Amino acid sequence: MEGDLLSAGPSDPNASLYAGRWVALVRGRVVAQGGTPEQVLRASRSSRYKERPEIVFMPLPFAFPPLLEKIKNVLPPGQEIHLVGGAVRDLLTSRFSPDLDFAVPSNGISIARNIANALKADFMILDGERDTGRVIVIHEDGSRTYMDFATYRGENLEEDLRNRDFTINAIAYNLQNETLIDPTSGGADIRAKVIRACLPTSLSDDPVRILRAVRQAAAFGFTIEKNTREWMKQAAGQIGSVSIERLRDEVFKILNGPKVSAAIRALDMLGVLPHLMPELLNMKGVEQSAPHVHDVWTHTLAVLDHLDQILSDLRVGYDAEKTGDMFTGLLSLRLGRYREQVSAHFSNSLNKDRSHRSLLFFAALYHDVSKPDTKTIDENGRIRFFDHDLKGAVVVAERAHAFNLSNDEIERLQEIVRHHMRIHFFADRLEKESQTPSRKTIYRFFRDSGKAGIDLILLALADVRATRANDLSVEAWGVYLDVARILLEHYWEKPEEVVAPPRLLDGNDLMKALTLAPGPLVGQLLETIRENQAAGKITTKEEALEFARAEISKL
């Protein structure tokens, strides 16, 4: 009992030592402390069994969101209710969570419905069997706060908390008296930046928690406690018992967060990948010829790191003048004017449940997945991977289907993996032959890739950084940035000139003027006209028809 040597009451300067904890006071001195009143009482009796302590909660120096006050005001008098889980953890780490979970002794659905009515918010039954209701508050800016009200999982609140995943998520905040209940010392683990399982069976009870621990460790900069890591390894083989949707959601949350490559490495070390994305493991130890400096697996993880850094450097509000890195400085100099457009690009996700960023990182994780299957060595000893991009598009689609991604997401992933080599070809030609991409080349690139073209540009920049690593010269980096600038300039500043020139005529015009029957020839002529239009060789309808006549005469 560390308080035996310290004097601290709620108004004492030393009170901050116990902020967020329950303490036992005897004549103003702290004689015990703990996460719940019961823990403190037991601890105080073990050393001061003849004295009757005062049990008090030492308040925390922060304000809770106004929404909690609204909920408190519409609850019936005396209603026992606690904010629990990640929302409490986030408040204790000065973060904001758009998802609020509440635990009540009973009538979770009924309480949720009443609160929704009082707040004029949306309501839905989330889990009838577990008596859980959801309230959805839509704010003026269109953002949403989800509030789930669930009946205790167990006999009481403490049992509910002890059966949760990790101690940092097993803290409850009492809305009525503004105190914390922390039976597993989660607050101490938050301060120590440690992720610890609540019970030895926490991971085997629900193996998806393995992914959640890795994600939260990366997100918060925490370490995973040694015993917990062992329990994670032991439960890794049970991943297959979890629904694919829950696994997918955790994977995409990892991909949307910080330190993606570190998280993927952790999943590998814990033995999760063979049961989750086994095809990735084939990349390990597959050597590559220069200019590559890493094997395929290490290269892939490096791509994730560089992609994260590039997106960070291109975010709105980034101060490029503060960087001492020449590569970052050049990136900002050549592409910095497109920060707003890049931000808007990533704000448009293909699925409301998964971010655009996470989809790009998924593509980056799989962009070289078929190199092991396509590896050849030519007569000069050079390692080649012919068609790894085309075959990789098939593999990423298979995994995306297994994860039940939407058709739009699967199509985007295929486009990124299938075309990820094209910008390298552009850069190689510029570097070796001083040839910039022609207008026709730019048109064809965006015709084939569409909006995925922006993703391809960013992935290519990360790819070359990972490929050459410290061997990448400033001059070579400048070449890639020039290609990226040219493509982005045409896409965002000159779309009607090259990327999507307005149609001068349609199929009916062509068939009528040239007496053509419907068929593939009409479509081929229209596309050839648009290519030459993008190249600046055709500008009027008359020129388009004349060009078509000339093409037909060649047949």
Image (cartoon, rainbow, N blue to C red):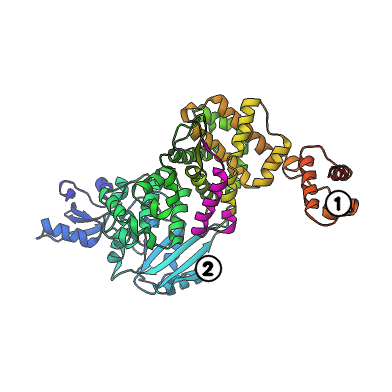
* Of labels 1 and 2, the one closer to you: 1
Q: Check disc 2 and report the residue beneath it.
A: 122
Disc sitting over residue 230 in the figure? none
* Residue range (magenta): 383-410
The part of the image, by quadrant, that contains residue 494 is: top right
Q: Nearer the viewer, residue 292 or 239?
A: 292
Q: Quadrant of the C terminus?
A: top right
Q: Position of residue 177 (x, y in %)?
A: 33, 62
Sequence order check, earlier mark of 1 and 2: 2
Residue 316 visible in the displayed image: no
Q: Is residue 2 above or below residue 241?
A: above
> Secondary structure beneath disc 1?
helix
Give me the residue at 66% from left, 47% from top.
450
Give me the residue at 31% from left, 53% from top.
232
Amino acid identity at mark 2:
Asp
Q: Nearer the viewer, residue 128 or 151?
A: 128
Q: Position of residue 182 (x, y in %)?
A: 28, 58
Q: CA distance from mark 1 to mark 2?
A: 54 Å
Q: Is residue 202 left or right of residue 96?
A: left
Q: Position of residue 349 (x, y in %)?
A: 57, 53
Q: Nearer the viewer, residue 356 or 107?
A: 356
Q: Check disc 1 and report the residue beneath it.
A: 510
Q: Is residue 537 left or right of residue 95?
A: right
Q: Nearer the viewer, residue 469 or 210?
A: 469
Q: Is residue 284 left or right of residue 155?
A: right
Confirm whether the magenta stretch covers residue 407: yes
Q: Position of residue 54 (x, y in %)?
A: 20, 59
Please rate how many residues cluster around mark 1, counting C-alpha atoms within 10 Å: few if below 14, some from 14 to 19, many from 20: many
Amino acid identity at mark 1:
Leu
Q: Main secondary structure of the magenta part?
A: helix
Q: Residue furthest front?
A: 379
